[in-house]
């Protein structure tokens, strides 16, 4: 059995890159407000009022153009990430293109995309890429998305203390979507559970609807987090239930808990091995090993 862990490529683009105003309802709302302001100015017939409304209109137009360009860049980066999944060569080509267009530590979208690709081969390098983002110079929501991915990669590398520091700074209210909030919740809960705050981790996960279709891409992360949280809180039946849920999805997911070097509590390792032993494939293998003449692979 090989260990299977989620990759950063499954994560979302930063919250700071998502703009709800560039859709039909958002544009209608903005247009309605601007129209109302102009109507007020025309009724007032005052040149000062008209001038102020004109300045506000130009500001709104400038803001929408900026956001539109940002979204066009986001679409281009997402398309590049999709093409990178074709082969290792395509991934290297995408990384070269992203590196060539990196505009500095404030280019959150570029750095996130690079980290997503780098994490598949070198999680440590991906973490360094994310650490190169100056969180003080990006919007708070985008900064929390970066903290979430950094903490996630720290957890993969068993750097729990660093993950805990990052998780403590994340605000769930900065999540712009259900999936983003689910990812943040999973990372915060796992970091807290593995650093002595199991009950607080359970509280975070209590507000998550695990069967929500919008959480499909992060459900494994949520289940893993709840395994650590439930175990830390002494809820053994809940722990076994989630270990079984992970096994049903993919038996290799239990590698996170039984593979040597994963810094998992010995009792939790035993519980995971007990669940693993109930898998039909494992039982078949065990019976084969008991057969006379069985020879282990060299």
Image (tube, rainbow, N blue to C red):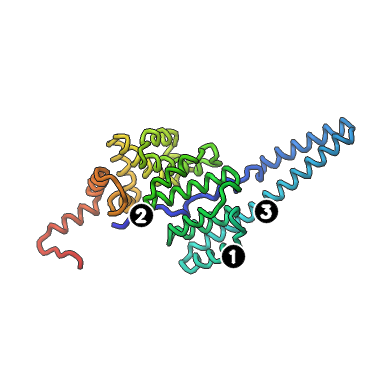
Q: Quadrant of the C terminus?
A: bottom left
Q: Is residue 260 above or below residue 298?
A: above
Q: Marks 1 and 3, how far apart in space?
A: 19 Å
In the image, which is nearer the foreground, mark 1 or mark 2? 1
Q: Which residue is mark 1?
A: 100
Which residue is label 2 attached to? 4
Q: Earlier in the sequence, mark 3 or mark 2?
A: 2
What residue is shown with label 3?
69
Structural crowding at the residue carrying mark 1, measured as other residues with C-alpha within 10 Å and reported as few (<14), some (14–19) or many (≥20): few
277 horizontally vs 5: left or right = left
Assign a secondary structure to mark 1. Answer: helix
| Closer-to-camera residue (166/193) | 166
Query: Looking at the picture, does residue 93 appear above or below residue 208?
Result: below
Image x and y of residue 74, in percent = 60, 54
In percent of width and height, residue 17 lies at: 60, 48
Is residue 251 visible in this depiction of the protein?
Answer: no
- Upstream in sequence: badge 1 or badge 2: 2
Q: Is 233 in front, or is 288?
A: 233
Q: Quadrant of residue 139?
A: top right
């Amino acid at each position: 059995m090989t260990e299977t862990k989620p990759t950063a490529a499954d994560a979302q683009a930063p919250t700071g890159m998502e703009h709800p105003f560039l859709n039909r309802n958002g544009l209608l709302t903005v247009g309605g407000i601007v129209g109302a302001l102009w109507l007020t100015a025309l009724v007032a017939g005052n040149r000062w009022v008209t001038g102020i409304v004109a300045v506000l209109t130009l500001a709104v137009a400038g803001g929408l153009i900026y956001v539109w360009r940002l979204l066009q860049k986001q679409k281009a980066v997402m398309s590049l990430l999709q093409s990178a999944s074709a082969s290792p060569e395509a991934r290297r080509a995408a990384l070269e293109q992203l590196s060539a267009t990196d505009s500095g530590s404030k280019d959150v979208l570029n750095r996130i995309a690079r980290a997503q690709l780098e994490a598949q081969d070198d999680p440590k390098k991906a973490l360094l890429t994310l650490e190169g983002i100056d969180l003080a110079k990006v919007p708070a929501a985008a900064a929390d998305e970066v903290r979430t991915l950094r903490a996630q990669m720290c957890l993969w590398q068993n750097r729990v203390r660093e993950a805990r520091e990052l998780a403590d700074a994340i605000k769930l209210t900065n999540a712009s979507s259900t999936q983003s909030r689910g990812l943040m919740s999973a990372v915060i809960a796992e970091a807290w559970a593995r650093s002595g705050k199991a009950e607080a981790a359970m509280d975070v996960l209590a507000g998550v609807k695990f069967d929500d279709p919008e959480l499909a891409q992060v459900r494994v992360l949520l289940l893993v987090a709840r395994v650590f949280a439930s175990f830390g809180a002494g809820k053994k039946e809940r722990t076994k239930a989630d270990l079984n849920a992970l096994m049903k999805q993919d038996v290799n997911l239990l590698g996170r808990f039984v593979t040597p070097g994963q810094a998992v509590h010995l009792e939790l390792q035993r519980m995971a091995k007990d669940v693993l032993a109930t898998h039909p494939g494992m039982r078949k293998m065990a019976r084969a090993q008991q057969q006379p003449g069985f020879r282990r692979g060299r």
